[in-house]
Amino acid sequence: SASGPSSESTPEQTRSHSRTGMDPDSIRRGIVDHLRYSIGRPAATLRPEHYYRALALAVRDRMQDNRVASTRTSLELGHKVVCYFSAEFLMGPQLGVNLLDLGIEAAAATALAELGQDLDEVLACEEEPGLGNGGLGRLAACYLDSLATLERPAIGYGIRYEYGIFDQEIRDGWQVEKTDNWLVAGNPWEIAKPDVSYRVGWRGYSEHYRDAGDVDRVRWVPGRVLRGVAYDTPVQGYDVRTCNVLTLWSAHAVDSFALAAFNTGDYYKAVEDEVNSETVTKVLYPNDEPEAGKRLRLLQQYFFVSCSLQHILHILDDLAGTSVRALPERFAVQLNDTHPSIAVAELMRLLVDERRLDWDEAWAITVATFGYTNHTLLPEALETWPLAMFDESLPRHLEIIYEINRRFLDEVRAAFPGDEARLRRMSLIGEEGGKTVRMAHLATVGSHAINGVAALHTELLEHSVLADFYQLWPERFGNKTNGVTPRRFLARANPGLRELLDATIGPGWLTDLDRLRELEPFADDPTFQRQWREVKRGNKARLARYVHEHTGIELNPDWLFDIQVKRIHEYKRQHLNVLHIVTLYHRLKQDPDATIAPRAFVFGGKAAPGYFLAKRIIKLINAVGERVNNDPDVNRFLRVAFVPNFNVQNAELIYPAADLSEQISTAGKEASGTGNMKFMMNGALTIGTLDGANVEIRDEAGPENFFLFGRTADEVEQIKRDGYRPADYVDGNPELAAVLGLIGDGTFTHGDTEVLRPVVDNLYRDDPFLVLADYAAYLEAQERVSAAWADSAGWTRMSIYNSARSGKFSSDRAIAEYCDDIWDVGPVPVPK
Ligand code: TH1
């Protein structure tokens, strides 16, 4: 143990004597060594990307020391480990945050400078791992950061997609998708672990037999088998020794030598399989919310869940004297939405079929182990699998799900006698329109804790989608409002603000974000206000340079920067934002003497490649932008830019440059949102509906520092019940009619009246997300924004208050709540 007599040196000695010191000299030696021994290019041909790779490897070495110490501490001392199961981890660039976390930004800059290199240029060489679609995957990444920073032992488990989210190009205003070949140049952060490998079955049948003790048993004889190999990426905590790990599984063919060890002939089919096993982890499905219902997607989910559970049981086996019965005392497994929810059936199979526990005991272990986080109420995003497909793919799991369901429905029957409708609603098997397996029900029934991701969302969850389950087990439900990491989205993204905060309230706020409240006394201080505005202006100039470089559009950093970045989706209502822009355009064209406070509208976000209307909305934004930016009547007051390929890297430039954050989803549709929090931390004011975490953002900031508009979730439901008729809003509002007319009549499309027709028709005829019902209220709120912007000191005060009161939205707060209320995992300091 750490305190016992040992021939090993103490950590301090290890540090200063080894090749992994944190001073500039040691780092320079680390870089030089890796250039020579890991990269191996003649000195004369070295470019910044080689220095990037060498520095990344040198940094990884330093994290690896911490990783070894962290594993030793948590295993030897018998601590519980959090396992975060997620089909997506949108990690973003690693070098910058790792330098920050290790406290070696300055030392690395010095080391590089001595080698004739510039740190910023080297940082820019990193290809980000885009293994996620949006908020859900980025949340998982923020949570890994906070787990490590709060010194909680944790493992992230997911899929090592060979191709992440596609790269977006804009051509002639349209989105064009390019495959994201992020691994071509190699990934210096991961360590391949070919010896950490598990077999995953698929198809086949189940076989009933009697074991040696004459007990009836079932075993699954898969028709096909593949192999998962672990790739580990260290996840360093900030200013602590704790370094956790993200384990991503990569699919490979089963090698035929090992196959010979199996006696069932069916295994040989695996070798002949025409489908290459490696396709399983080939590509991330690019849909943010709607479900594809594709067999390969189910296989991806089962594949990573099975590898991860096998790995966890293996770790337990390796801990001397630890029985599988101790699983819930040693591991807490969180299901990030329903994508990993097949874990409930897989753990039952591993415990009952393979470890031969009896059903009741296995079930108690399973429920005590899992927690389930729901991230959406949208009906089309609730995963269900066609029963026939599920049966063919995972026959044994379907049997297990039937048995879970049988026992579960008995429990419901006992609690609500005679309520047949309730049984049908709660069943794990859906009967409407062809039988399906309902994954949200499986995750709910198999978990001891179920949570939503914002107060309003949890409330709606308890009273709509999961109302029946809430009535059965109210004590299992709770809210965990999302959070984001201030290390990446404040300290790294906004170095100017970081410096100002250090100078104003002293260090410590980065791991205790509530301390930003200490800014409040400075909110009206003219000197501080001037410094605040200078930081913001610098960030806007930085974004303007980026936008110019990538689109050719010029933005003036003195204008109001009004920004909406997020996936393109009808419920997020980017088109409502566009209706505002076109309204301003129309007013300026109508009245040559009109003037308005100049604004730069910035958009960014990807559309799912198969989402027709979302792609038209991108075209709409770019078409309006082209017209507005080139018309001298209006471009003195308005500019519109669409930043191509919104990703973590450019997000770090975008959030700190915003004056106004657009959070305008239809109330009740956005579960939480997390971009809204990143904007707030960086001093943007929000214009938004009472949706998701906006509600709590407004509560924290104070209603006077937030531009509220729009129908509430209850009103939205009421309007829908009464029969919503969008055309009525157009008939009653000549300005709106004119605006829709301009979009439909070719004004923005060189006379083409077809391109944008689907968007106009959809609004006029269906408008499923009540864009037109909220249009007037949105315009009125935007007038309040313009009036507030005119008072520079007043705006600055509101901006300061927004940052100062953003502490709640740190992922440290969220993770502390998960650890206390769901996982029962406390801090495990790793000695420095
Ligand atoms: C998002 C939610 O839309 C967003 O409101 C929330 O802030 C975020 O999750 C984190 O909680 C979701 N992303 C996905 C992605 C898929 C399926 C469902 C959701 S919900 C693939």
Image (cartoon, rainbow, N blue to C red):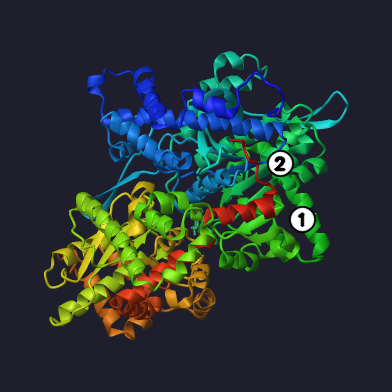
Marks 2/1: CA–CA distance: 15 Å
Residue closest to the eye, 602 or 408: 602
Q: What label sits on residue 399 in the rendered view?
A: 2
Query: Where the C terminus falls, by quadrant?
Result: top right
Give percent across and percent down for residue 720: 50, 76
Residue closest to the eye, 188 or 401: 188
Q: What label sits on residue 661 in the rendered view?
A: none
Does residue 14 appear in this view? yes
Give percent across and percent down for residue 562: 31, 66
Q: Is residue 257 above or below residue 278?
A: above
The reply to whether discs 2 and 1 touch (Cβ–Cβ < 8 Å) is: no
Query: What type is the residue that disc 2 sits on?
Result: Glu
Q: Is residue 133 above or below residue 316?
A: below
Mark 2 residue's CB less than 8 Å from ligand 1: no
Q: Earlier in the sequence, mark 2 or mark 1?
A: 2
Give percent across and percent down for residue 437: 63, 49
Residue 699 in the figure: left or right of residue 215: left
* SS for dot 2: helix
Residue at 63% from the left image edge and 58% from the top image edge: 451
Residue 244 in the figure: left or right of residue 502: right
Which residue position holds label 1?
409
Identify the image quadrant of residue 462: bottom right
Residue at 49% from the left image edge and 27% from the top image edge: 191
Give percent across and percent down for residue 14: 55, 25
Residue closest to the eye, 452 or 112: 112
Query: What type is the residue that disc 1 sits on?
Result: Leu
Does residue 310 appear in this view? no
